[in-house]
């Protein structure tokens, strides 16, 4: 028998994840984006990442069909961006509020890291699509991540608290 979806969602929620925004430009020039927390590295050689897109996402079809996409790893101060891209607005990307990658991917400024990718493969699996991207460019900045845990946004304790805990261990 299949697990109860509500209980399974609660169990999945016990795993803290980072929060990302994925974005692309469609063939008609329309910009698409969504907040995701299913993101992981796949390989260093070749340089690959993956994100999972729920089939019910408004931008699912555009992202799954795009030749490329951008992934912006959100910093602790970007909860507003996470909520904006998770919302129902049709215009996710305000003019001048992003940069465009080589394959049409869209990237947010001031994020913790970003990846500019060409779509390598698209795999339908269950109620999600696994989107694998080949990294063409990337960048990492200093800072703390925005986290998602038990259905809500979280942050790490201040840096000084983390250092004190490590030193006392």
Image: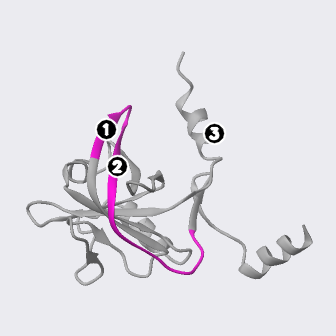
Residue 99 drawn above or below residue 91: below
Question: Camera-side residue: 141 or 144?
Answer: 141
- Disc 2 marks which residue? 132
Instruction: Count neighbours of disc 2 (C-alpha within 10 A) and say few if under 14, some if 14 to 19, many if 20 or more.
Output: many
Q: Is residue 138 left or right of residue 28?
A: right
Q: Earlier in the sequence, mark 1 or mark 3?
A: 3
Name the residue carrying label 3: 11
Residue ranking furthest to the front? 45
Q: In this view, which residue lies farthest toward the left?
A: 28
Label number found at residue 123:
1
Circle 3 residues within 10 Å: few <14, some 14–19, many ≥20: few
- Name the side, left or right, on which 133 lies relative to 15: left
Camera-side residue: 59 or 22?
A: 22
* Viewer-closest of 93 and 71: 71
Picture coordinates of residue 147 (x, y %)?
58, 63
Crowding at label 1, few (<14), some or many (≥20) Cα neighbours within 10 Å?
few
Q: Quadrant of the N terminus?
A: top right
Magenta span contains residue 130: yes
Q: Which residues are magenta?
A: 121-145
User: Within the image, what quadrant is residue 48 found in?
Assistant: bottom left
């Amino acid at each position: 028998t299949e697990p109860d979806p509500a209980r399974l969602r609660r169990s999945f929620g016990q795993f803290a994840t980072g929060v990302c925004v994925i974005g692309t430009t469609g063939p008609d020039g329309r910009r698409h984006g969504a907040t995701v927390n299913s993101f992981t590295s796949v390989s260093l050689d070749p340089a690959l990442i993956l994100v999972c897109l729920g089939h019910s996402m408004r931008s699912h079809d555009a992202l799954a069909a795009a030749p490329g996409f951008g992934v912006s790893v959100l910093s602790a101060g970007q909860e507003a961006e996470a909520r904006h891209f998770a919302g129902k607005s049709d215009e996710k990307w305000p003019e001048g509020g992003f940069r465009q990658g080589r394959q049409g991917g869209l990237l947010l400024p001031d994020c913790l890291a970003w990846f500019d990718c060409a779509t390598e493969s698209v795999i339908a699996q269950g109620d999600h699509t696994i989107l694998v991207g080949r990294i063409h460019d990337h960048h990492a900045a200093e800072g703390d991540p925005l986290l998602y845990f038990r259905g809500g946004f979280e942050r790490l304790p201040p840096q000084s608290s983390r250092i004190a805990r490590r030193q006392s261990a």
